[in-house]
Amino acid sequence: MSYRDLNPSLRTIMTPGPVEVEPRVLRALSTPIVGQFDPEFTVIMDETMEMLRKLFQTNNQWAFPIDGTSRAGLEAVLSSIIEQEDVVLVPIYGRFGHLLTEIAQRYGAQVTNMETTWGQVFDPADVIQEIDRVKPKIVAMVHGETSTGCLQPLKEIGEACRERDILFVVDAVASIGGVDVRVDEWKIDACIGGTQKCLSAPSGMAPVTFNSRIESLLLERKKVEQGLTDLKASELSKRRMIRSNYFDLSQLMDYWSPVRLNHHTEATSMLYALRESLRIVLEEGLEARFARHQLHEKALMQGLQAMGLELYGDSRSKLPVVTCIAIPEGIDGESVRSMLLRDFEIEIASSFGPLKGKIWRIGSMGFSCRKKNILSVLGALEAVLIRHGAQVKPSEGTQAALDVYHQHQN
Ligand SMILES: *Cc1c(COP(=O)(O)O)cnc(C)c1O
């Protein structure tokens, strides 16, 4: 018996991840393997670290990928800094705040949440007030909430954390490479990104960066474990920690430094992919790249609104790379999505929890974020909605988007 050739369709992917992979990244993935301590490979590791620092806009020494999907990055950071009973504040404004909460709890933290209506973000002053009430060791927050299409301003919260000597951990998985993320300026102590969103590489790595404040904590932990501290036995017994081997940032630092202490076997091909995706980001330039994402966001939003659709979420805090649409009354959202995929080979996303069945989400990330895709999704959505008996204004959507593009050219 034989199996058919692997031959996946060339879809137009307009979801918040995974997105279409840059052709250059696909080519990088098929280049030959070298050993993980081959000098050629360690140069690639160092170059990737250098490019990651630029991506994260940081001077941190430590910037490297965790092998695993983005949540591996979240887990590596949180598991390496949380001790039992540590107080962690996680403000939640969508699904991924719940993920941060769950990971922190599994490592023994006392998590306090604060919530705001989905579709909105927090006023930084409210978060700071809660910080002063809860007095956490760590504040962990999402920057771009993929589930609701919202973007949380972080600078004031980061500054408040720094003034109070609190660690500030940020999930920038959805925003990194598509939206401005200023790790140093916003006083973020540890920041986690993803590959399969605005970097347009496959899923399977999580770039992270962290500063010397986190590093000091890791070094101090190491001493506690080796019994090399002045702490009394009674104090030591309180310092308990659930320690992951795979996600141990201290060991990973030894692996990503000139010491090159063996930890895991680096995911060679994925590192090639990440390196190529970073090269593309830096060639385009961060500012130009953010502006490109905003231009296509504008064309998409104006197109959807001209068609007569209603956008979901507070427009003042919209995440430029995810656009949420209220599913019109009486329309079966899943039927629309499957017709888009079947007849147009275009994939858009639904959402989770309280938003399930209520909104669609269109991602415009990385390589998927281009004129052809925006115009295709607008044209196809219009056709499919008409097919479903929805009241849309025929051809207004693509025309409005074309207006945005033509104005931009002039
Ligand atoms: C996609 C996403 C994640 C999780 O990524 P995985 O690669 O699926 O583990 C975490 N946080 C945010 C904000 C995301 O958008």
Image (cartoon, helix red, strand yellow):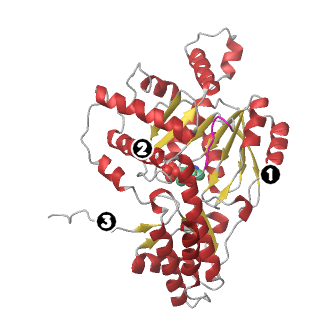
Image x and y of residue 388, in percent: 54, 88
The answer to whether residue 254 is visible is: yes
Disc 2: CA contacts within 10 A as few (<14), some (14-19) or many (>=20): some
Residue 269: which numbered mark, if any? none
Q: Earlier in the sequence, mark 1 or mark 2?
A: 1
User: Predominant secondary structure in magenta?
Assistant: loop
Q: Is residue 287 left or right of residue 49?
A: right
Residue drawn at x 54%, y 58% as measured from the top left: 292
Question: At numbered mark 3, what does the secondary structure look like: helix, strand or loop?
Answer: loop
Question: At numbered mark 1, what does the secondary structure look like: helix, strand or loop?
Answer: loop
Position of 213 relative to 209 (above/below): above
Image x and y of residue 139, in percent: 71, 39
Classify residue 227 by image quadrant. top right
Residue 123: which numbered mark, if any? 1
Give the quadrant of the C terminus: bottom right
Position of 117 relative to 131 (above/below): below
Residue underneath mark 2:
279
Residue underneath mark 3:
8
The amino acid sitting under disc 1 is Asp
Q: Nearer the viewer, residue 145 or 290?
A: 290
Position of 243 relative to 52 (above/below): above
Front of the two marks 3 and 2: 2
Image x and y of residue 52, in percent: 49, 37
Question: At numbered mark 2, what does the secondary structure look like: helix, strand or loop?
Answer: helix
Classify residue 47 by image quadrant. top left
